[in-house]
Image (tube, rainbow, N blue to C red):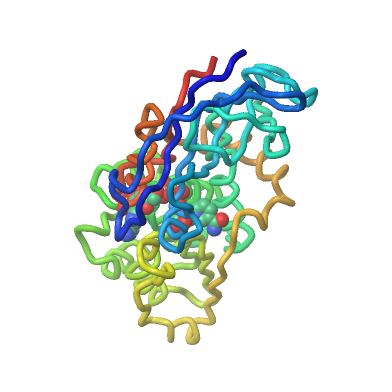
Amino acid sequence: MSSLTSREVHLISRPEGIPVPDNFTMVEVEVPPPEKGEVLVKNIYMSVDPAMRPPMTNGQTKLNSVMGAGAIGMVLESNNDRFEEGTHVQHRSGFREYFVSDGSDLQVVKTQGEAVSTHLHILGGTGLTAYGGLLVTGQLKDAETVFVSAAAGAVGSIVGQIAKIKNCRVVGSCGSDEKVAYLLDELGFDYAFNYKTTSIRRELHIGCPDGIDVYFENVGGDHLDAAVGQMRPLGRIPVCGMISAYHSKGARSEGVTSLANMVYNRVTMRGFVATEFYDIRDQFLADMRKWMSEGKLKYTETILEGIERAPDALIGLFTGLNTGKMLVRLADDV
Ligand SMILES: NC(=O)c1ccc[n+]([C@@H]2O[C@H](COP(=O)([O-])OP(=O)(O)OC[C@H]3O[C@@H](n4cnc5c(N)ncnc54)[C@H](OP(=O)(O)O)[C@@H]3O)[C@@H](O)[C@H]2O)c1
């Protein structure tokens, strides 16, 4: 095959606050044919993640060069014995349509009948984050009360469902009335509220009348302040993320005023990253596949079409555009 043209997304200016489309541009590049030992990959789905936002401010994301993101592609042409043509591969080279690789950055995706996109969320890092954060870091026990913020998003929606599987009372916060209905009617949450139109503190008193055993922290700021004040004795706060802080320099969160309750109630707060849980990946995949096949665990995807929508997808994480996992579809899976 001769060289082909690929479009890719560059960051061209550093956002202040929520990113805007003008912070990005689309660039066309020529992708050469793969040489000996190399493969040509066509990207099919890419992920956008809130954690991409702080590096756009602190300089880690370079200006005027292609951005990175988790993605799944298909090997179109192979000169590498490890990869057959047509194989799905997972990698960090999102935000572009095609690329050539020597294979060292590619992992073969092994599906068992499920949609390949699920390996970018419920059966991938998102799911492992929810599973490990709740069960390992959060030390969840049967029949406890769990509060999860950003509950209708990718991680939060899985956290809530796993907690329901563990017979817990589950309360979630989210940013619209439609999402409240989704949590209650589709995912079986016991209580949910729209943090944009009500008092988080008051809602937690109603939703968790006996207090919170595990607060799965995705948001920070006012959510953390309200939740800490409601924690029960020996409660746990697995700190997954702080999306409300990601636009500020140094990802500085708003102040928390209720920390004394951590002393009175001997509460543990512990940050984690999903890579900590790689050693339990086999158990994670077995449990998730079983719960999905039993109809106890569902997923929702919000899919924007085409590389030109990749900036909108990233921006949308901060405006609440997504329910479940935000993905961009870059090409058909053929
Ligand atoms: N520790 C780890 O290894 C790890 C791995 C993956 C993700 N994370 C963290 O997990 C959290 C969720 O990530 P995700 O990928 O599942 O994203 P997501 O929840 O699918 O998308 C982000 C959601 O956050 C909500 N949000 C945005 N700005 C907000 C604000 N200022 N206050 C409250 N809610 C806000 C929006 O929903 P609403 O409509 O409800 O506002 C949005 O849909 C993030 O904090 C992320 O950094 C951590």
Q: Residue at x 59, y 15 (%)?
A: 2
Q: Residue at x 70, y 45 (%)?
A: 281
Residue 83 in the figure: left or right of residue 324: right
Q: Quadrant of the N terminus?
A: top right
Q: Residue 120 is drawn in which quadrant?
A: top right
As rendered, which of 87 and 147 lies closer to the eye? 87
Q: Residue at x 41, y 41 (%)?
A: 324
Residue 152 sits above or below residue 240 on the image: above
Q: Residue 290 is drawn in which quadrant?
A: top right
Counting every numbered tag in the picture gives 0
Q: Position of residue 147 (x, y in %)?
A: 42, 60
As rendered, which of 205 and 123 lies closer to the eye? 123
Query: Would you say residue 169 is visible in this rendering?
Result: no
Residue 286 sits above or below residue 149 on the image: above
Q: Which residue in the rendered view is the most extreme toward the right?
A: 81
Q: Quadrant of the C terminus?
A: top right
Q: Position of residue 88 (x, y in %)?
A: 63, 25
